[in-house]
Amino acid sequence: MHLKHISDSSSLVRAYLPVSDDQGQLLGDLDLERQVKEFCDRYRDLSAVNEPDPVIREAKELVTRYTLRVNFVDNSLRGTITKYRIREGMLFNIMKELITQKDIKWMAWFKRNFNQREFRSVSDYMKLARMKNIIRYAVFGKERLIQLERQLSDEQKEQEDPIGAFLEENGIDFNPEQETDDRELRIEADIAINMRKLHKVEITEIPRELVEALVRNGRDLEKSHIEELKRAQQVPDKDVVEYMKTIIDKNGKPEPIMTPARKAEGFKKTAERFLKAVDNAFEDQEYVLQFDRGAYDLLKQKVLDLERLIQAN
């Protein structure tokens, strides 16, 4: 790129030059960078390739080595930047404590003194920085640490080494030679959080793959879902796993399970609405004249049948 395109921004020029001048120094392998560059230049025009198989084999070998190296450097840099971000969060936490001691609203003060568009990101750094010894684990990257933090209870966060304790119990799926997928990290955290919701109320029948299906559909287990799943455990002819499948199939809006108690409550509400309609009839003679006598006789018979059933029990 010609510098005339960015010459008006000195900070952009300073950012561009290290990128432009890099010959593989950041990669840590000048020879590999040279090989990849020469290969791409050599086969820029593929019309001259008569035997594609040797070219494919060479490209495959190069891309395998190159990808591993790039992923490693990318994750390593993420770790270093995360360490800086945690330090940044520490600074902001100190400022927030002092600002609030002066009875000044933190968000308002931040927006007056910093770029308000950065508030959400800064809040993430501050949240991480509040956890003890978090900086030991900066190598895992900001996004992964944020998702780990989401999975910890308030009690766990108060431990001397909360991330270390979590890793001892659960381990961590992190290979620095693999590309980090931030979206996948969020999904994995959401799955773990929803699994914990189920286990907390002793719903252990539901397999992880069903929870994953729900999360990948953009849903979470809500309080109402948990309540219905608990009811499914209590109703003999209901299967908890099958009901979980209906939650997924109906995009989080399945039919409620009609337990005897819920049916009784539904009947009570229906009766209350009917009594209100009767009161309205007393006040509106025209309504009475239009009333269907057949419907009234049927209703009267049903009430008598219900009374006999109640007396029999």
Image: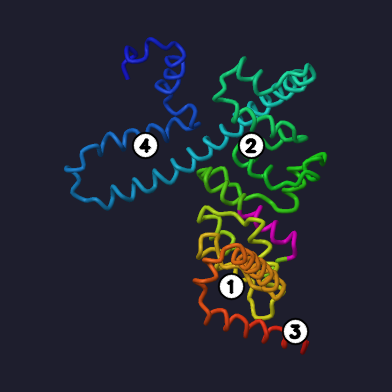
Of residues 280 and 134, the one drawn nearer to the viewer in this rendering: 280
Disc 3 residue crowd, few under 14, some 14–19, many 20+, Cα 10 Å? few
Name the residue: 57% across, 25% down: 118
Mark closer to the observer (1, 2): 1
Q: Earlier in the sequence, mark 1 or mark 2?
A: 2
The residue under label 4 is 36
Asked if labels 2 and 3 touch by Cβ distance under 8 angstroms, the answer is no
Q: Earlier in the sequence, mark 3 or mark 2?
A: 2
**Residue 242 shows which numbered tag?**
1
Q: Earlier in the sequence, mark 3 or mark 1?
A: 1
The residue under label 2 is 139
Mark 4 and mark 1: span between their CA atoms? 53 Å
Of residues 291 and 132, the one drawn nearer to the viewer in this rendering: 291
Mark closer to the observer (4, 1): 1
Magenta stretch? 191-202
Q: Earlier in the sequence, mark 2 or mark 4?
A: 4
Mark closer to the observer (3, 1): 3
Local SS, label 3: helix
Disc 1 residue crowd, few under 14, some 14–19, many 20+, Cα 10 Å? few
Indicate the position of residue 149 as horizontal and vertical percent values. 69, 42
Mark 1 and mark 2: span between their CA atoms? 41 Å
Mark closer to the observer (3, 2): 3
